[in-house]
Amino acid sequence: MALLEILTYTHPALRSQTEEVTQITPEIKTLIDDMVETMYEAHGVGLAAPQVGRLIRLFVYDVGDGPHAVINPRILKSSGEELGNEGCLSIPRLQGDVPRATRITVAWQDENGKRHRKSVEDFTARVYQHETDHLYGILFTDKAIPSSLHMIEDAEEEEALAEAA
Ligand code: ZN
C-alpha cells in the first residue's frame, strides 16, 4: 500500500465532475487500499477519489466500524434536515455547520462489484452526503452556513481532524 497526496482546495480536481467506475480492476482495488491508508494517516473519516486526483465515482469511509469502499453511489431518497459541524481533509483547519438530510437511501457497489441499497442516518448519512458531493465537485464550504465557518487553532486540531472528511 502507499500513501497518496491529498489535494487541497485550489486544485481543479476538487471542482471537477467524475466518471462512473465501469470495471473494478486490480488497479481500482489498489487505489481503494491506498485511499484507506491515506485516510487513516490523515485521521479522517472519509476520502473521495477526486481528493487524490482521480476523477472517478469512488469514496472510502470509516465511521468506527471498519473501512468501507463505496463505488458509483446514488442517493435515491433523503429526508429530514439537521445542522452538523464538518471539516474536510482538502481544506485543512476550516470547519463549519452544514445542513444535511438526516436520513438517506443510497445505492452503490462495493469493491467486489456487489450492489447494495440501504438507508443510513445521522453521522453516517452526513459522511455519505459529504463524500458524494466531492464526486460532483462540491465542497462543504459551498453548503455551510457562511457565518459558522471558522479556522481552528493548533490545540484543537487533533480533535477536529477526527471529524474531517
Ligand atoms: Zn471532504
Image (cartoon, rainbow, N blue to C red):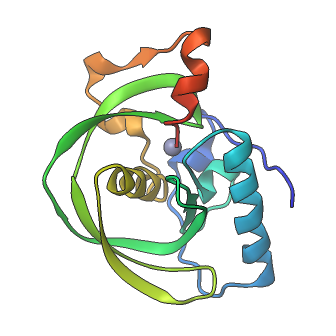
Quarter of the figure with the N terminus: bottom right
Residue 150 spot, x, y in % from top left: 41, 15
Q: Which residue lies furthest to the left in this view?
A: 80
- At 49% from the left and 23% from the top, the residue drawn is 94
Q: Is residue 131 left or right of residue 161?
A: left
Residue 23 spot, x, y in % from top left: 65, 88
Tag count: 0
Q: In this view, does 42 lie to the left or right of 121?
A: right
Q: Residue furthest right?
A: 1
Quarter of the image where one finds residue 104: bottom left
Closer to us: 44 or 55? 44
Q: Up-down: is 57 above or below 151?
A: below
Q: Up-down: is 3 above or below 7?
A: below
Q: Residue furthest front?
A: 65
Residue 119 spot, x, y in % from top left: 28, 71
Q: Is residue 60 left or right of residue 2?
A: left
- At 36% from the left and 20% from the top, the residue drawn is 149
- At 69% from the left and 51% from the top, the residue drawn is 52
Q: Is residue 47 left or right of residue 99?
A: right
Q: Up-down: is 18 above or below 40?
A: below
Quarter of the image where one finds residue 25: bottom right
Residue 66 spot, x, y in % from top left: 59, 61
Q: Up-down: is 154 above or below 32?
A: above
